[in-house]
Amino acid sequence: MDVSPRDEQVAAEAAVERPGPMQWWRTAVVYQVYPRSFADGNGDGVGDIAGLRSRLPYLQQLGVDALWINPWYPSPMADGGYDVADYRDIEPDFGTLAEAEALIAEAHGAGIRIIIDLVPNHCSSVHPWFVEALAAEAGSPARERFHFRDGRGADGSDPPNDWQSRFGGPAWTRVTEPGGMPGQWYLHLYAPEQPDLNWDNPQIRSEFEAVLRFWFDRGVDGIRIDVADGLVKEPGLPDGAGFDPARGVPWSDRDGVHEIYRSWRRIADSYDGDRVFVGEMWIPDAERFSMYLRPDELHTAFNFDFLSCPWDGTALRTSIDTTLQLNEPLGAPATWVLSNHDVTRHVTRYGKENTTFDFADRRHGAPNDPALGMRRARAAALLTMALPGSVYVYQGEELGLDEIENLDDSLRQDPVWERSGHTDPGRDGCRIPLPWSTEASSLGFSPSGTTAAPWLPQPAHWAQVSAAVQENDPASMLALYRSAIAIRKRRRGLGGTGFSWMKSEPGMLAFTRGDGFAFALNLTDEAMVLPDHTSVLLTSTALAGGCLPPDGAAWLAVAPEQD
Ligand code: NOJ
């Protein structure tokens, strides 16, 4: 075979600049696909696997290393697929198991790994196990798979404890017994259509171990674990009121959960090809959070501390330091996440007066400055992609999509809207089908000629930020993401763990990553002089007379540090 000098150069670069294949998850750029809203291949207005397969070239060009696909299992969609009716099949609206297998193979062919979403805390109320439990008696083995309890009060009409659903209202629903009388209650930390599974029951443990193997056998490279902190409950299910705050809360982060992940890790490790877990835990205590990342547990977990952090130099610096310091001794890579399908899109968040994210105070409707939000979002992209660890990109973030806050209330589908008594608008605003082109009916979300409308309406202004429009604009958000990901792949230091803050003026966040790379972010209201550099690699905004404008970020080549 002839090898041209150019091929040799590419091969040499690949050898030194790519993290080893056994380490892919330490530095990966992972693109989150919310399948209902990514791309519709069959023209029914709902995104599907066919649509995702047709857009693999786009994702390959973006340069992402892996996809995380939100739940794709058969589901009544009471909570966007987080109510799973069958863990070993595909939702018919999304396609078939054969199509999922074809997607995995095609993605692998394109150099893209696949992470799927597992929902072990609860299943759907139409899952055969729950149907069986409803038909069975109190105390039966079928009910033992869930948390069924008698109610309190003389006639059992009060819930068994004071726990609240995270979607609002009590975390318990009373069932009508087979004989027609009101009977026991069952626990659901989320919607009533999502009964919590009882992880003290060995059958649940073995079932999920089998489910892990089912998907690993089909070639998936990783598993995102939904509500990873919630599986084990405090024995006896005590009230939250009066529970010793030093011991946390009785429904989350119980010590017993770690044994589950140790057994799962053994399964992942028994497969070839470096299969990984990413945990979803909204745990305020950073030390407790890091315990999930011990070497025999989860490989990674979403860094929600950083996601929730305000756009403020001191707060950002503290969050970065805390993350790196906690992860370092565990040998676990940090993750950097700005948005996902549960939170307000960060272009909108960063344009508000209060730039933090908090579920309890979603601040929908608070005014926002779109231009300011966009400037900060561009800088935040360069910040996260310059930090050591892996990066998550939520679909549409690379287009700079905003949160749609004026959705008609009658169209809202997120159960949060109803369960909160219409006080929390829910998460539909970050789940609007993507704009691929300016094509009139669905902005290219569905094939042209489709008459079915997208399952949530797209705003007219998204035509101008569609992928097709940004494709031809070197100043677009899409171009920025493509360039940043490409540089990140080329520069060896960015895949490493080296990191040190540089001395800088107050209001500037600046750090080096070794290998002659430096990052600078201006968090003041005035343009600032860049740190010493040999060349500018990439900026989030045009420099002004060589200076970095407010909310601007720059990637710099600097003279390599001397030993
Ligand atoms: C976290 C998921 O990200 C969210 O979308 C879902 O509603 C809850 N877990 C319950 O499964």
Image (tube, grey):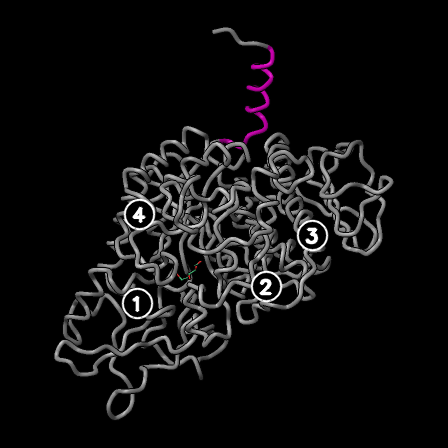
| Majority secondary structure in the magenta region | helix
**What is the distance, in whole Å, between disc 2 and disc 1 at their CAs?**
27 Å
Name the amino acid, label 3.
Answer: Arg
From the viewer's side, name the closer residue of 382 and 399. Answer: 399
Q: Earlier in the sequence, mark 2 or mark 1?
A: 1
Q: According to the image, label 2 marks what residue? A: 357
Q: Is residue 8 magenta?
A: yes
Name the amino acid, label 2.
Answer: Phe
Task: Judge from the rendering whether residue 524 lies leftward or rightward of residue 202; answer left or right.
Answer: right
Q: Residue at x 41, y 48 (%)?
A: 35
Q: For mark 4, give the secondary structure.
A: helix
Q: Earlier in the sequence, mark 1 or mark 3?
A: 1
The image shows residue 31, relative to residue 170, as above or below, that is above
Q: What mark, if any, has residue 496 been given in the picture? A: none
Q: According to the image, label 1 marks what residue? A: 195
Characterize the local packing of mark 3: few (<14), some (14-19) or many (20 or more) Cα atoms within 10 angstroms: many
Q: Residue at x 41, y 60 (%)?
A: 227
From the viewer's side, name the closer residue of 305 and 552. Answer: 552
Which is in the foreground here, disc 4 or disc 3?
A: 3
Q: For mark 3, give the secondary structure.
A: helix
Which is in the foreground here, disc 4 or disc 1?
A: 1
Q: According to the image, label 4 marks what residue? A: 212
**What is the distance, in whole Å, between disc 1 and disc 3 at their CAs?**
40 Å
From the viewer's side, name the closer residue of 454 and 147. Answer: 454
Which is in the foreground here, disc 1 or disc 3?
A: 3
Question: x and y percent of residue 252 in the render?
Answer: 42, 68
Q: Quadrant of residue 556?
A: top right
Characterize the local packing of mark 1: few (<14), some (14-19) or many (20 or more) Cα atoms within 10 angstroms: many
The image shows residue 148, relative to residue 386, as above or below, that is below
